[in-house]
Image: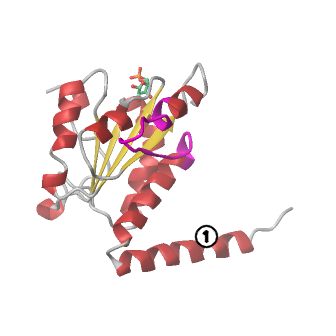
Amino acid sequence: MTEQNQPLPYGRGSESGRGAEGGTSPLVIVLMGSKSDWEVMRQADETLKEFGIPHECRVLSAHRTPAETAEYVAGAEARGVEVVIAAAGGAAHLAGVCAAHTVLPVLGVPMESASLKGLDSLLSTVQMPAGIPVGTLAIGPAGARNAALLAVAILGTGRPDLREKLWQFRERQKQKILKETLA
Ligand code: RP5
């Protein structure tokens, strides 16, 4: 098994799905096309942890591991996964490929690329043909964080406790901004 097929070392022993204490099944899977995406996608991982969402983070590529990606995503629904987050950069096909293999909601996060600053990733992720939707977030860290928050909101439609946590998060965010001072 290659490094790309190993779960990333996100908060071992926390609410992280595979490898989590108690063998919790993930509700959200966070995929990224390369380990080089992890520094940004940590934000999704940390946000999901903040909300106590069992999840799993993995490197899987639409181009470098196409068969493994298809197999993993196709099996997600049967494992109890409810939301897929997929991040990729450049010719960013990962989210679209995920969406082709599942009817679970797929949230795409375009990674900033060296040559085109992520505009290539954004267009590759967002321009899906009618019939295979990908909910595309902003390029980079804001997209990573918002993908996780949107995943919580999707899970929250049937879980009042999660909706309450989202309201509490908004309140904390509001209070932080209201307390800002400018020197
Ligand atoms: C994409 O190509 C990845 O998602 C990454 O953003 C980009 C570059 O990958 P590496 O060459 O750094 O592995 O597949």
Q: Residue at x 45, y 23 (%)?
A: 91
What is the span of residues highlighted in magenta in the rendered image? 124-142
Residue 80, relative to residue 111: is it above or below? below
Q: In this figure, which residue is indicated by the disc labeled 1? A: 173
55 vs 44, left or right, is left
Scheme by which the image is coloured: secondary structure
Q: Secondary structure at mark 1?
A: helix
Quadrant of res 21? bottom left
The amino acid pointed to by label 1 is Gln
Please name the predominant secondary structure of the magenta segment in the image: loop
116 vs 177, left or right, is left
74 vs 128, left or right, is left
Quadrant of res 92? top left
Magenta highlight on residue 147: no
Q: Residue at x 26, y 56 (%)?
A: 16
The residue lying toward the viewer, choosing from 131 and 111, is 131
Residue farthest toward the right in the current orientation of the protein: 183
